[in-house]
Image: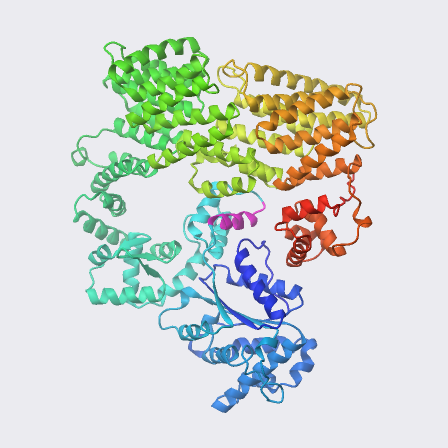
Amino acid sequence: MPTTSFTTPFIGREDELARLTRVLDRARAGEARAVLVAGDAGVGKTRLLAEAAGHAAEAGTTVVTGHCVDLGDVGLPYLPFTEIVGVLADDERFSAALASHPVVDRLLGDGGGGAGDAGGRLQLFEGMASLLTDLAESAPLLLVLEDLHWADQSSRDLLRFLLSRGILQSRVRSRGGDPVAGGAPGQRLAVFASYRADDLHRRHPLRPLLAELVRLPVVERLELRPMPDGEVARLVRAQQVAPLPDATVRRIVERAEGNAFYAEELLAATSETMPGAASAVPSGLADVLLIRFEQLAATAQQVLRTAAVAGRRVEHDLLRDTVQLPEEELESALREAVGRQLLVPGDDDTYSFRHALIREAVYADLLPGERVRLHRAFAGVLAGRGHRAESAAERAHHSRESHDLADALAASLEAADHAGRVRAPAEELRHLEAALDLWSAVPSDARPEGFDTVTLTLRASAAAAHAGETHRAVSLTRSALARVGDDEDSELAARVRYTLAGNLMRIDNLAAAFTYSNEALAMIPADPPSRTWVWAAATHVMAATYMGEDEAAHRVARKALRIAEELDVSDAQADLLISLVSLEGGSRRTPEGRARLRDARELARGAGNASVEMRALFNLSIGSHESGDLDECLTWLTEGLERAGRAGLLSSPYPVEMRYLRSLMLYTLGQWDECLRAAETELAGLPTAGRYAIGPALSVALARGDQHAAERARALLDGPFDWMATLIAGLLLTDAAVLRHDAEEALAQFRTTLAALIDDAGTTPHVAVRLAALALTAIGDAVVESRRTGDEQGVDRWTETGTELVELARITANKGEDDTPQGPEGLAWLARAEAEWARACARPDGGPDGGPDGGPDGELSVGAWEKAVAAFGYGDVYEQARCQLRLAEALLVAERRDEAAAQARTARDTAIRLGAAPLLDEIERLIRRGRLAETPSTAERAPVLTARENDVLLLLSRGRTNRQIGEELFISGKTASVHVSNILAKLGAASRTEAVAIAYREGLVEPEPSASG
């Protein structure tokens, strides 16, 4: 039977699908079962059932579906069963079976006529049971009933009979009417019935039936919960050809709250306007959401409209005082709204809308005057409660929406104070910006005392910086600078300038930062000593260091440190000590440097300055990473992120960099699945300026052959310039070109990225070594290809370019940003660059057929790659495997076949474990060309798998998903899944990765020749 088709891939619900599949397997074995699938409208019931039905059909099960339809009080009796019989009657395969059952004519002839009396109904019920029993005898049968909440009474009664006394129980009768002993165990039948949980109000007629059915041993209930955010994000991305901005995806995911239909509707509304622009509930979705609202009584609608103005959640007392209804009427209205599952009562005497979009739809349906009136009522009730911190934000919102701007200003400032105390910088920023917006609209005599716009703006810029909104912080500080008049005191003017300098450094505008820090330092004298001068000096030290003015920075730092000690400004002491670590030669990579950083951390913690403590912890973690001590790095990262979480600073610059570094560590150590999970979990909490933190997860996707990874990396470059985002995107895009063997693009990405990363002082960043090594990989490929085709001009050009890049790598690695040699990671990339350059410069001497070119200096190439493999042994498993592949090539050229085979096998095992399909393909080609396989071919072995399973196993070894396997073999993804399960069972493997490893070890996989092989 045809099943519903969908244009988007099936995402998530693996556990639920597996549960339905197990029921189908048991049914095919003769154990009849039923599953009641519950879930809110749009949560994915139909899609799950279609997927399960497709799986059943592929396995030879007859699938037939009946739909219940909302026809109000005039519903047609037996409608879903009539549809089922009609579908069967139209299929000639079942004509003989149907001809012997009078129930067919009774249902199709007059919609169940003759069944009005009790005897007639029983005959119809038993006739339907007999029909289904006969069909199940000829082939396994799956009966799907959609939208059971709309079922008519007759259909509900028939379903009760079938599940409790008919086809699933021992009362099944044969065609002759005699009872069949033990009928249930022999029935190859499954029944899947879906219903909307959110439509079942307390008096819904389906409720008693469900309560009765779930007590039956052969019936189980499957509740579809909202989808996890990560799966909704995958669903949204899967429906768009072009990559969506992460912010757009996050917004859709937040509003959909796990509902697939809502997500699709919100995506469609977004796509019809500008990406990310849609904010109102789409009209079609609003119509769906308001159906149940419009079925409420007038008083209940009034209560729900008032609750919608309060927000997603409202306290009972606040709602009561605002709506001003008699207690009995209010309770009756609330009971109706809860019964219709529009509101959900909470344990803390509150009510919440079941879904945020329901609230949005009700709120949008209000008339403008009605909206203002209700906001004013809420503001009045909240004001009557006094100046309570927890209600200040609500009062500010309602006062603003009701145009009481003076009260909105006062409440916004109260709310900002509260957000600051509870360490919620994003909320503090929002309230402060609201206050600044309102300031000029409120008469001066109505403004709260003790505030001015300059200090408020400075405070807002600090909140923006803590929230990770770095460009907003710069904008706010510039605004404060514009508001500082000539008559302002010099200390305030200096504070504005050094704050602006600090914010400019965060967006890598170093020259401007140096200018403003100079101005701040010149505006106030060092004598008499003051805290303002100390902080101006500490900021200037950082700016001067970035500009390469180390001597001046060191002189100011030493003087400021003495004054900070005299004044006991311990957090400034800590900040200056961190700067002096690099200025006095004890870099953060050395034990001595990290000891000084630990002292700085303790000083900052003692002073309660979490921002400076974050700077110390970041430098401790990155110093450990640069020195190759990955365990120590993870320790500092764990402490730093825990402290940042407690301080409300997870979105501020240093913790965001630590979040990136933690993901990078997971990627480097080969914990790729955990890296992806961490990115999915943290993506929603990242500020716009911290999008680069998903870079390691994109590296995983790229290395696993994800075609969209490069486009997502390119999206990191959207918006204002960000140094880290440019760095991460540059690395990813260069490597993407390498994987495509596109030397021109790799070189262009290298040059573009490096030009963007060189700072105002002309300093070449450490990452130039890695960028050069990656570009040299593609250049080496281009040289080998040019030699193969006899293009001597191409050989000369690419060799000359390779020489330029390796020289840059050497200089940068040995004399980097702070004039000190790089640590283990940088030296590993230098070794990789040297080895790639040696490969490019090697003279041909006729290597293996179709393999890489070599030369008399082949042993030198072997030595270079051995150094690279050893250098990446500090912990980077993927890059070590890439180097092992190149080492195997060089060993082949040097005719050291056994060593080449060993390196290739080791690299292959790593590629399989990581799921790095492109790397695995390269290794397989080398093994095939170099004839390095030591095990007999599949054809020479006793067959373990079927021919089709061997085809599936080969694609499995190349990292294909079930869907991709199905597409290549012209079978469904569900059938591919069955084959994969059989392969795992036959090989005794617990996972796909283990199965592939066994297949390689046992010689069950022999890769097909490639076009270039």
* Viewer-nearest residue: 256 or 567: 567
Tell me: 510 left or right of 806.
Answer: left
Relative height, residue 197 to residue 599 (above, below): below
Give the image location of residue 795, x and y in percent. 76, 21
Residue at the location (59% across, 46% down)?
241
Is residue 715 visible in this depiction of the protein?
no
* Viewer-nearest residue: 100 or 498: 100
Residue at the location (64% across, 19% down)?
805
Relative height, residue 887 to residue 999 (above, below): above
Dividing the picture into quadrants, the one containing residue 206 is bottom left
Is residue 320 visible in this depiction of the protein?
yes
Position of the N terminus, as image quadrant, is bottom right
Tell me: 234 left or right of 847.
Answer: left
Relative height, residue 642 to residue 541 (above, below): below
Looking at the image, what colour scheme do you see? rainbow
The part of the chain drawn in magenta is 229-241
* Viewer-nearest residue: 869 or 923: 869
Q: Main secondary structure of the magenta part?
A: helix
Position of the C terminus, as image quadrant, is top right
* Viewer-nearest residue: 41 or 368: 41
| Number of disc labels | 0
Examine the structure image and report whether residue 230 is included in the region drawn in magenta: yes
Give the image location of residue 553, x and y in percent. 40, 12
Tell me: 758 left or right of 98.
Answer: left
Give the image location of residue 253, x and y in percent. 46, 48
Give the image location of residue 631, x and y in percent. 49, 30
Residue at the location (57% across, 73% down)?
32
Examine the structure image and report whether residue 112 is included in the region drawn in magenta: no
